[in-house]
Amino acid sequence: MTDVKIQSVRNQMADVHRSGTNRSIEWKRTQLKSLKRMLFENKGRFLEAVAKDLGKHPIEAEVGEISRTLSEVDELLRQLPSYAKPHQVPSPGVLLPAFSEIRYEALRSPGVLIIAPFNYPINLSLVPAAGSLAAGNPTVLKPSELTPTVSSLFAKLIPQYFDASAFSVVEGGVSETTSLLKHPWGLVFFTGSTRVGKIVSARAAETLTPVILELGGKSPTYIAKDCPNMKVVADRIIWGKTTNAGQTCVAPDYVLCHVDVLDQFVKQAIASLQRMFGEHVQNADLSRIVNENTAQRLIAKIGEIEKSGGEKGKVVHGGLDVCDAKGRFVSPTVILEPSLDTELMREEIFGPILPIIPVSSDEEAIQYIAKQQGGMTPLAF
């Protein structure tokens, strides 16, 4: 989309702001109902699109993409009257006899810009959009160019269900995102990597646009020596690590395991993988990596460990033999005691590779985590 077209969309949204139409509950409810109808009437098309882009099984996509979004829309529709209602609050004594209240208003004209990621391309596009529209904000969605089928489907369907002044789509990559960020917005909502988040934040600062950054990181998991049920813990960790082939920002990035229960956890983790995916994992219902380059990057992390001859860690399950970069398939892999100077431990993995690091105490685990890159979801068992 050219700058002229972007400006055209912005002008239409600015007109809505000036008219005040977007402040009414009716406008907000209409947008949310349109969003819900779009998902219901095209669920099959959305499931097919996400299967093509990410290889997601229909059940996984239904739960992680469609149902999650519909649940959010339903909750917003239920709560809309209370969200829109002014709330009276106490006033400072020096202002008597004045009274004070909080009123919730739409953000700055022309609206909100959502820059969505590839890993949950429906959920992480439409859930932020639902919240934005419920608040009375005309919204522009920039889907990820890494999931082109989903992006194209958004571009076809959203104009059928929404007026361009309420909800529009801008497809494209870096060039289009850069063009969008040249303009001021009420808010930029970005989900993605820390590297790109810094760029988005810097560009938004030039127009004094506030930003919400939902970034990733190396989310740690700690297993203490008093962990009561190792089978259950292993199942939960492996499920979190392999859902969407590990391409989840809240997935466990690595495990710190107390040495007293290390062997027990490794055994149960491998057993869990075998129960979930069987002996022929490449034929299992496991999502694929978003593209060949990313798959190759993950495979290189495993290769660095395997080629070290044990000096930088040990692959105890999975490995290079069943990986296929062209097929975007990375086998779920468990690596014991990886060196901190490996690529595996220097950056967020974002794939189905689970490093396990032994520690001898709770305090050692805490100190280890404190020295590493932060993550969104620390877990302890």
Image (cartoon, rainbow, N blue to C red):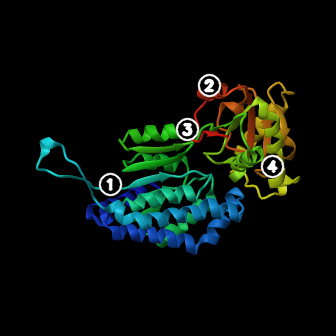
Residue 333 in the image, given as x and y percentages of width and height: 79, 42
Q: Amino acid at mark 4?
A: Leu
* In this rendering, the label closer to the viewer, 3 or 2: 2
Residue at position x 64%, y 25% in the image? 363
Q: Which labelled disc corresponds to residue 320?
A: none
Rounded to the nearest whole Å, what is the CA distance between mark 2 and mark 4? 30 Å
Work out whether mark 4 precedes mark 3 in sequence or the reverse, and give the earlier one.
3
Rounded to the nearest whole Å, what is the CA distance between mark 3 and mark 2? 23 Å
Give the image quarter of residue 106: bottom left
* In this rendering, the label closer to the viewer, 4 or 1: 4
39 is higher (above) or lower (below) than 194: below
Instruction: Kindly tell me whether residue 258 is visible in this rendering.
Output: yes
Residue at position x 57%, y 50% in the image? 117
Residue 178 in the image, given as x and y percentages of width and height: 48, 46
User: What residue does disc 2 label?
Assistant: 367
User: What residue does disc 4 label?
Assistant: 273
272 is higher (above) or lower (below) than 40: above
Instruction: Kindly tell me whether residue 171 is visible in this rendering.
Output: no
Work out whether mark 2 precedes mark 4 in sequence or the reverse, and give the earlier one.
4
Given contact means CB atoms under 8 Å apart, are the residues at marks 3 and 1 in contact? no
* In this rendering, the label closer to the viewer, 2 or 4: 2
Work out whether mark 3 precedes mark 2 in sequence or the reverse, and give the earlier one.
3
* In this rendering, the label closer to the viewer, 4 or 3: 4
Q: Which labelled disc corresponds to residue 194?
A: 3
The quarter in which the C terminus is drawn is top right
Residue at position x 58%, y 60% in the image? 122
Rounded to the nearest whole Å, what is the CA distance between mark 1 and mark 2? 46 Å
Q: Amino acid at mark 2?
A: Gln
